[in-house]
Structures are given as structure tokens and as C-alpha cells.
């Protein structure tokens, strides 16, 4: 992996409590899986930083090496890799995502 | 690029011989699949580790030949399966 891509990724993860590497942006996602995770974070009203990997080819490849994970999107919370689309969807459905956010002191909208 | 359903199943079963694998072709285009994998090898592993085991079984095809594979993993716990 290029050092610059590695530094860029580390910088985003270190400086944003909730950081989503995705294809496109939350308002204009370029892939259904990225859209799904971004929508879940929106539903939960989580303040997150999104990084569009389509804007930078070395970032797009670099994040796969960095996380040892072959697909995008990828969600990081407080520097910890939480998972890709399948895992986040499952965690959202079974309430584990809310628990995780709570345990990491991330503000979000709880189900009323 | 597309990948055959049987090929995906074969690779997963090679890596996880005790597993039950159910694969669906979601769009009928040989390009968007979902796989449910039940294996005793998943016990004691985190979801991330479980999904990585499946990705590893596909030997680098994930993200290349294989564009979209939704993965669901379940532990097989001897008693009820």
C-alpha cells in the first residue's frame, strides 16, 4: 500500500469518531451497499464522516489492505473496524449497533 | 465479470467442510448473490472473523470476479442442527 494512502486513512479514522468509507456520498451514494449503511447511520441520527473512495484509487485499494477486508463500505467507530454492509445491517436489525454506539459514547437517536 | 453459483459453493465448502451453504442469485444475473453459511468453525469467532473466513475461502475473488455477495454466517451448535 502507498504510504500516502495509509496516512490518509489513519488520519480520517483518528480524527473522526464515526468514519464511513463508501462509494459516493451519503446524499449521492454510488452503490446500494454503501447507501444501505449510510442510511442506517442517518436513521440513527449519528454524526459521521464519510470518505468517498471513488475519488481516490489508492484510497479505494488502500482501505481494503488497511482493514484486511475486500469490500466497501467499511465502518469505523473510535478507530475500531466494525464491519461492512452485511454486518452493519445485521447489527442494526438485532439492536447490537445501538448497543455498540452507546458503549462507545456516540450520540444517536434511540428508538422511542 | 460473473461467477457461477456452484463455484462459490464449492470454494466455501472446501474451506469449511462441515458447513451448510445456501446461495441465492438475487438478480438472476450471475453477479449479485447472497450466501447463508452455517458452520461449527464459526463458534467463538466474531462476526468480522466469520465473514473473513468466508472471504478467504473465495481466494481473492471477492471484489474482483465476484462483485456482490451478501454474507450471513451462523454458528452450528451441535444440539439443534
Image (cartoon, coloured by chain):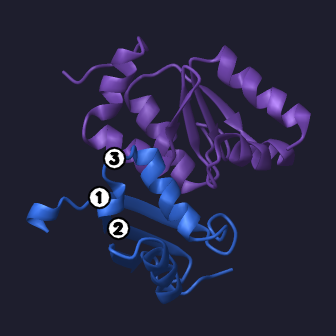
Chain colours: A purple, B blue
Residue assigned mark 3: A90
Q: Secondary structure at mark 3?
A: helix
How far is disc 2 from disc 1 in space, using C-alphas? 6 Å
Q: Relative to A11, is B2 on the left or the right?
A: left
Which residue is at 61% across, 50% downward? A69
How many C-alpha atoms fall within 10 Å of the one at disc 3: few (<14), some, or many (≥20)?
some
Q: Are marks 3 and 1 in contact (CB under 8 Å)?
A: no
Which residue is at 65% across, 47% downward? A68
Placement of A13 over or under B36, stated as above or below: above
How far is disc 3 from disc 2 in space, using C-alphas? 15 Å
Q: How many marks?
A: 3
Q: Are marks 2 and 1 in contact (CB under 8 Å)?
A: yes
Query: In the image shown, does A112 or B4 lie closer to the viewer?
Result: B4
Residue assigned mark 2: B37
Placement of B22 over or under A62, stated as above or below: below
Could you tell me which chain the residue with mark 2 belongs to? B
How many C-alpha atoms fall within 10 Å of the one at disc 2: few (<14), some, or many (≥20)?
many
Q: Relative to A20, is A103 on the left or the right?
A: left
Query: Residue A8: percent from the left, percent from the top?
Result: 81, 28
Residue assigned mark 1: B74
How many C-alpha atoms fall within 10 Å of the one at disc 1: few (<14), some, or many (≥20)?
some
How far is disc 3 from disc 1 in space, using C-alphas? 12 Å
What numbered label is drawn on residue B29? none
Q: Secondary structure at mark 2?
A: strand
Amino acid at each position: 500500500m502507498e504510504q500516502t494512502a495509509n496516512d490518509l486513512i489513519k488520519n480520517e479514522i483518528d480524527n473522526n469518531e464515526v468514519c464511513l468509507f463508501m462509494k459516493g456520498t451519503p446524499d449521492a451514494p454510488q452503490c446500494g451497499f454503501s447507501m444501505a449503511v449510510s442510511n442506517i447511520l442517518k436513521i440513527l441520527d449519528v454524526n459521521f464522516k464519510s470518505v468517498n473512495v471513488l475519488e481516490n484509487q489508492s484510497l479505494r485499494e488502500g482501505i481494503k489492505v488497511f482493514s484486511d477486508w475486500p469490500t466497501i463500505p467499511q465502518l469505523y467507530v473510535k478507530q475500531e473496524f466494525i464491519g461492512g454492509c452485511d454486518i452493519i445491517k445485521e447489527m442494526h436489525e438485532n439492536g447490537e449497533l445501538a448497543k455498540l454506539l452507546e458503549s462507545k459514547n456516540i450520540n444517536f437517536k434511540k428508538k422511542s | 465479470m460473473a461467477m457461477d453459483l456452484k463455484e462459490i459453493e464449492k470454494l466455501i465448502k472446501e474451506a469449511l467442510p462441515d458447513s451448510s451453504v445456501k446461495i441465492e442469485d438475487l438478480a438472476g444475473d450471475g453477479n449479485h448473490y447472497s450466501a447463508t453459511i452455517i458452520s461449527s468453525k464459526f463458534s467463538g469467532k466474531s462476526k468480522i472473523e466469520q465473514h473473513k473466513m468466508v472471504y478467504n475461502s473465495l481466494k481473492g475473488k471477492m471484489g474482483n470476479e465476484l462483485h456482490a455477495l451478501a454474507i450471513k454466517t451462523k454458528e452450528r451448535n451441535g444440539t439443534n442442527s
